Amino acid sequence: MIRAILTATCAVLISVMTMSASDLPDGVKVGDVAPNFVLKGTDGKSYSLASLQDMKGAIIVFTCNHCPYSVKYEDRIIALHAKYLPLGYPVIAINPNDTVIVPEDSYDKMIERAKEKGFTFPYLIDPTQETAKAYGARRTPHVFVISKVKKNYIVQYIGAIDDEPQDAAKAEEKFVESAIDNLIAGKPVEPSFTKAIGCTIKWTKK
């Protein structure tokens, strides 16, 4: 009897935890105003959309240390920043994971990884996960390309960096590059949405 009660209780708790982890806001769609944020970077500074100053937009990448997909994409993210920063579209990387669940993604480990890889872009921690929720990020990596339209930053592309999560040399469709090239050329972004492929974000269990 006691065992049955404990089993039932555990099942309910697991169900509640699963529901709370999946019951997330939809986030932004292409064409929406990009949500602002104020997050701490590995350099100890705070960053927000206002930090973009005279930039035309940004490549916001939700990523992390531990995810194998994120690791595979690190060099490509570095290359995107090097290519598009001079054109007004810097990378802003954000780690959305619960660092209790994944200690490898802690702020101290982020600092170590940024130094090890030589990140020249801001690498920010989202400790409350509110920024990831506001954007609708679900995986690492998950990209949101934004561009400035009048006084607001508008979401122009959501999804994957390219079509090859394992081997950069085999990528045939470079979605982020295409999106920014089209924005710079004044052309419509097509595709403006793709499926992000990567590790699921580790949400804080309520």
Image (cartoon, grey):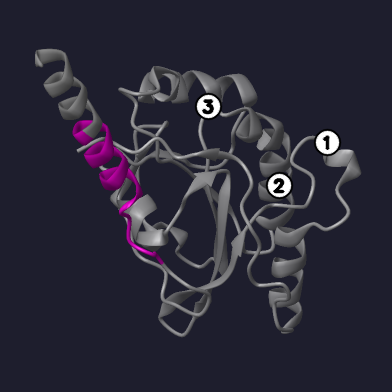
Q: Earlier in the sequence, mark 2 or mark 1?
A: 2
Q: Residues within 10 Å of mark 2 (few under 14, many from 20)?
A: some
Looking at the rendering, which quadrant does residue 174 occupy?
bottom right
Screen quadrant of the C terminus: top left
The residue at the point 59 percent across, 54 percent down is 90
Q: Is residue 19 magenta?
A: yes
Looking at the rendering, which quadrant does residue 179 occupy?
bottom right
Q: Earlier in the sequence, mark 2 or mark 3?
A: 3
* Apparent side of residue 167 relative to residue 95 in the rendered image (left or right): right
Q: Is residue 113 magenta?
A: no
Q: Nearer the viewer, mark 2 or mark 1?
A: 1
Which residue has dot 2 on it? Answer: 82
In the image, is residue 195 above or below residue 94?
below
Q: Which mark is residue 167?
A: 1
Mark 3 vs mark 1, CA separation in Å = 18 Å
Q: Of 153 and 193, which appears nearest the observer?
A: 193
Secondary element type, mark 3:
loop
* Apparent side of residue 161 relative to residue 27 in the rendered image (left or right): right
Residue 13 spot, x, y in % from top left: 20, 32
Residue 118 spot, x, y in % from top left: 62, 27
Mark 2 vs mark 3, CA separation in Å = 20 Å
In the image, is residue 37 above or below residue 112?
below
* Apparent side of residue 35 relative to residue 157 in the rendered image (left or right): left
Q: Residues within 10 Å of mark 1 (few under 14, many from 20)?
A: few
Q: Which mark is residue 65?
A: 3
Residue 198 spot, x, y in % from top left: 60, 41
